[in-house]
């Protein structure tokens, strides 16, 4: 049994005091803006317990002290990796990709400065890569069917989790996960593995060369991205932040877009609780006012 140094009740190895939980939540928030409410303590314990035991740390209080003394080190990055939720799949919420093909891309090319020279998109919470590769395939398909001279384009992809970015950069996925809207795209954009890679597929170079991954905390001071962008996907992310952080992030995304550019958020996200300078177009699609 261990006594919590910040005034919490005595705890066993498996029990986290309320005081320690609040301290860990504050630490997570300060480095990622991920907000954990009062009802997420059991989730936090389940995600961090194996790591604490791996480190040989006997109490949650001691684990917090270990983290707080090394806030710029690798351990804090591991903490954020364990907390970040990375549920994704190819062409998730496919209506967004349908709207890209039917209206959004052509609107950007016609009305946004520089888009016809180099079309720039950003998947701001790319997780293990399924979203930016889905975005890249959609753009590639659209441009290949569009008359006129070829258009240069790039999809920048970022995530706070280094662990998921390694998966994204490898670009190898189980074939059973590739439920693509068009079955022909499997042959066109993926190479089937053989031998030890049997049952897996790798994204082909003609897509890989148009997707650039990097680690970005959405609340860091500067984004290492070109500006202005024409399209930003920031889907199913806002729900993890409290309202003030949501408003700050949306304002930053607005500043990253060219006038007339588009922001797409997830169906579980909402911009209704704070002021912003986007025009809502329904279904999680927003446009920067010109």
Image (tube, rainbow, N blue to C red):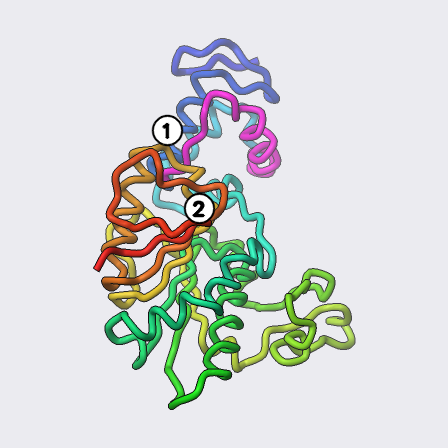
Residue 58, percent from left and from top: 56, 26
Judge by depth and name the residue closer to the eye, 29 or 269.
Answer: 269
Q: Position of residue 207 (x, y in %)?
A: 52, 77
**Relative to the observer, which residue lies in front, 206 or 268?**
268
The image quadrant that residue 275 belongs to is top left
What's drawn in magenta, residue-wise?
33-55
Where is residue 78 shown, x and y percent of the image?
Answer: 49, 45
Residue at 36% of width from left, 63% of height from top?
A: 231
Q: Is residue 271 left or right of residue 191?
A: left
- For the residues marked 2 and 1, what is the alpha-carbon distance in whole angstroms? 15 Å
Q: Residue at x 45, y 76 (%)?
A: 210
Check residue 52 for magenta coloring.
yes
Q: Can you tell which quarter of the image residue 256 is in?
A: bottom left
Residue lying at the far bottom of the rendered structure: 149
Instruction: Look at 27% across and 56% down and name the residue there.
Output: 288
Label 1: how many Cα within 10 Å (few below 14, some 14–19, many 20+): some
Q: Quadrant of the C terminus?
A: bottom left
Q: Main secondary structure of the magenta part?
A: helix
The N terminus lies in which quarter of the figure?
Answer: top right
Q: Work out whether residue 287 or residue 239 is closer to the camera in this orientation and state it.
A: 287
Q: How many marks?
A: 2
Which residue carries the number 1 mark?
26
3 is higher (above) or lower (below) than 265: above
Sooner in the amino-acid sequence: mark 2 or mark 1: 1
- Circle 2 or circle 1, nearest the eye: 1
**Percent x, y of residue 239:** 44, 38
Q: Residue at x 53, y 72 (%)?
A: 137
Q: Is residue 2 above or below residue 88?
A: above
> Residue 77: which disc?
2
Q: In this rendering, would 76 be left or right of 185?
A: left
Q: Secondary structure at mark 1?
A: helix
**Magenta includes 255?**
no
């Amino acid at each position: 049994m261990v006594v919590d140094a910040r005034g919490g009740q005595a705890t066993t190895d498996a029990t986290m005091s309320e005081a320690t939980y609040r301290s860990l939540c504050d630490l997570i928030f300060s480095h990622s803006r991920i907000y954990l409410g009062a009802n997420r303590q059991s989730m936090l314990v389940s995600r961090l317990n194996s790591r604490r035991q791996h480190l040989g740390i006997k109490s949650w209080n001691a684990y917090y002290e270990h983290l707080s003394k090394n806030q710029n080190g690798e351990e804090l990055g591991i903490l954020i990796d364990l907390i970040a939720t990375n549920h994704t799949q190819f062409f998730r919420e496919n209506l967004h990709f349908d709207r890209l093909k039917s209206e959004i891309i052509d609107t950007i090319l016609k009305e946004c400065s520089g888009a016809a020279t180099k079309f720039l998109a950003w998947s701001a919470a790319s997780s293990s890569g399924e979203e930016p590769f889905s975005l890249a395939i959609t753009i590639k398909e659209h441009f290949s069917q569009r008359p006129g001279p070829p258009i240069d384009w790039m999809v920048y992809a970022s995530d706070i989790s280094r662990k998921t970015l390694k998966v994204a950069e490898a670009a190898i996925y189980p074939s059973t996960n590739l439920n693509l809207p068009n079955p022909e795209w499997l042959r066109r954009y993926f190479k089937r593995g053989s031998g030890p890679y049997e049952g897996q597929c790798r994204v082909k170079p003609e897509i890989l060369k148009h997707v650039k991954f990097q680690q970005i905390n959405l609340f860091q001071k500067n984004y290492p991205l070109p500006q202005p962008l024409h399209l930003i996907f920031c889907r199913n992310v806002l729900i993890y932040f409290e309202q003030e952080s949501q408003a700050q992030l949306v304002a930053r995304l607005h500043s990253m877009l060219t006038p007339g550019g588009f922001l797409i958020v997830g169906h579980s996200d909402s911009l209704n609780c704070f002021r912003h300078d986007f025009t809502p177009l329904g279904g999680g699609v927003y446009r920067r006012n010109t």
